[in-house]
Amino acid sequence: MNQPEPATARSATLGWLCASAIAALVAACTSAPLPAPPPAPPAPKPIPKPVVVIPPPVEPAAPSFVSQARTPRDYRQDAAQHLYNLNANRIYHGRMPPLLYAIGVLQVEVDNRGNVTGTSWMRAPRHAPEVMADIERTVRAAAPYPAPIRLGRVTYTDTWLWHKSGTFQLDTLTEGQM
């Protein structure tokens, strides 16, 4: 039998050994396959444009009280009665005493809806600033006044007769003085 020469056998073994080592080395150098990339996020849904709803114009409510007065003097009656109705517990009943704590003359401007748009003193009781403030507060708190539908807007004047107790009468509806 023919036996391979030892050098050739060694070289073949050495070749297989080198090839195996290279294959192992190459296998060791490669990394595991990369994981698949995550799926792309879904495309954002289009945002609908906001719907703008414009409400129809709101008509102001009709005044609940109306005045048929044709002159500022006639309107003064309606305004005085309105103030008396809202301040019944503050009205001095009967004839007022001869000496009053304060007397003031106030002009009140009322718009076509009965809202007070301004006040001005023609005769201010400056010795009693608390009375002035209380009268102005009372006048403004009584709004809305009867709407002067025939006049459109009105400026009326009334005289406030003030008792030291904090009660009052308006000259328009006074019961007189002793």
Image (spheres, grey):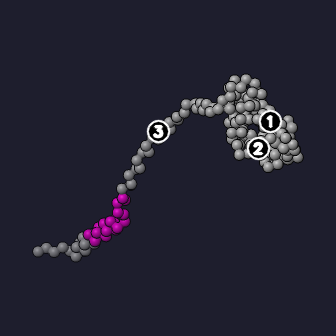
- Which residue is disc 1 drawn over? 171
| Of residues 33 and 52, the one drawn nearer to the viewer in this rendering | 52
Q: Is residue 125 visible?
A: no
Amino acid, disc 1: Asp
Highlighted magenta segment, given as a residue range: 16-35
Q: Give yes or no for residue 17 being in the magenta stretch.
A: yes
Q: CA distance from mark 1 to mark 3?
A: 66 Å
- Which residue is disc 3 drawn over? 48
Q: Residue at x 74, y 40 (%)?
A: 139
- The prevailing secondary structure element of the residues shown in magenta is helix
Q: Residue at x 50, y 38 (%)?
A: 50
Task: Indicate the quadrant containing the N terminus: top left, top right, bottom left or bottom right.
Answer: bottom left
Q: Secondary structure at mark 3?
A: loop
Residue 119 image-quadrant placement? top right
In the image, residue 20 above or below residue 73? below
In the image, residue 70 above or below residue 116? above
Numbered tag placed on residue 92 in the rendering:
2
| Of residues 19 and 129, the one drawn nearer to the viewer in this rendering | 129
Q: Give yes or no for residue 31 being in the magenta stretch.
A: yes
